[in-house]
Image: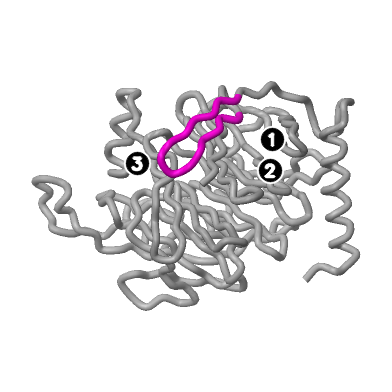
Amino acid sequence: MRTTRSKVLAVLLCVGFVITAFAPTADAWGRDRTEHRDRNEHRGGRVDVLLDGLSSPKGLDTFIGQPVVAQGAFGPPGPVLLHLSLFGRSKTLEVSEPLSLVDVAVGHDGSAWLLGTDFVLYRKTIFSDPKPIANIAEYQATDPDPDDLEGNPTESNPYGLAVLPSGDALVADAAGNDVLRVSKHGEISTFARFAPEIVATDHLPGFPEPAIPSEAVPTSIAIGWDGVYVGQLQGFPFRPGTSEIFKIPFKADGALCDTDGPSTNCSVAESGFTAIQDIAIDRWTGKTYVYELAADGVLPFEEGLETGVFPPAVLLELRGDHRRELAAGQLSQPGGVAVGLFGAVFVTDGTFTEGRLLRIRS
């Protein structure tokens, strides 16, 4: 728990930042950017295009309910952007120099963790430039995946990022099949591992085996009131409907998530998804948002990489046992999903072509 003094300081920083950002003079965080807005009504929510022309905007989080976008995951670097919509006015600020980032996560104190394509995890405070904290690939070279199926147990692909209430960062490594905890001082430990799962192959005509082991491929992390939630893609044979969301305690150390055997400090919270790219939790309403690569998963998406014609992404809203799709048919090449003020849901898409930031009001 933070002290009262720390809480007051954090609030003052947030309030001061908002006042400065909406003042008519230039602010200390960065330069203004023009905004393109288009509003449409689609099944399952109203869609506002807040920004377009972004460079591979996979990373997304919120700060004081406003979207923070990281660019450059699969394309040229771009600045981290903070898009503000308050008091009937909108403004977009560049809060960093151009960077190549896979993801971004903002802590309660306003500091931002930045996950680079160079495998380095950076941390930026409101008044400082990004500083390197830890090299994920170097750690994974000393912490091999014990259940690797591809002959490369030290391979690393840091893909998802979140910040714990303690201020430590969590990194989902899609190639290492684990989630790492990183302190502000750069200390790394293995928070959780994910074991392979036996997956049927009847969706692949002529495949010689009826079922094969499949790596978990964790891609995304969300922080709930009651623990950490981790979404997975589920590796080859990429069977639709086999991706799951796992729940892990905040204080876990070396948890094991295993759907075919005994787990340790890990349970399946939700199942039946396809190629999860990102997840988000609205802790006020209890809703969970799941952003999937495509309805039929990885194989059609890979065809899109070759042809340039991508299948629609799928954004699901979960509340209890009820699931519904938002903005059906309007999203492609999914990046991140985050929850803002008053139930607004933000997503990025176009991560391999021209990217966008969108707001979806459900």
Q: Residues within 10 Å of mark 2 (few under 14, many from 20)?
A: some
| Residue carrying label 2 | 66
Counting from the top left corner in percent of width and height, residue 38 is at 55, 25
- Return the disc, 1 or 2, that comes first in the chain's sequence: 2
User: Which residue, given by chain and number where applicable, does mark 1 sit on?
Assistant: 83
In the image, 311: left or right of 136? left
Q: Considering the image in quadrants, where does the N terminus appear?
A: bottom right
Answer with left or right where residue 299 lies relative to residue 65. left
- Tell whether 298 sits left or right of 167: left
Residues at marks 1 and 2 touching, judged by CB atoms closer than 8 Å: yes
Task: Say whether residue 173 is visible.
Answer: no
Q: Is residue 43 magenta?
A: yes
For the magenta stretch, what is the residue range?
37-50
Residue 46's x, y, as percent? 51, 38
Rendered view: 290 above or below 39: below
Q: Position of residue 208 (x, y in %)?
A: 10, 51
* Residue drawn where x is 34% and y is 30% of the image: 310
Which amino acid, by three-letter code, is at mark 3? Ala
Question: Could you give the CA–CA distance between mark 1 and mark 2, rounded to whole angstroms?
Answer: 6 Å
Indicate the colouring scheme. one colour
- Name the residue type under label 2: Gln
**Badge 3 is on which residue?**
294
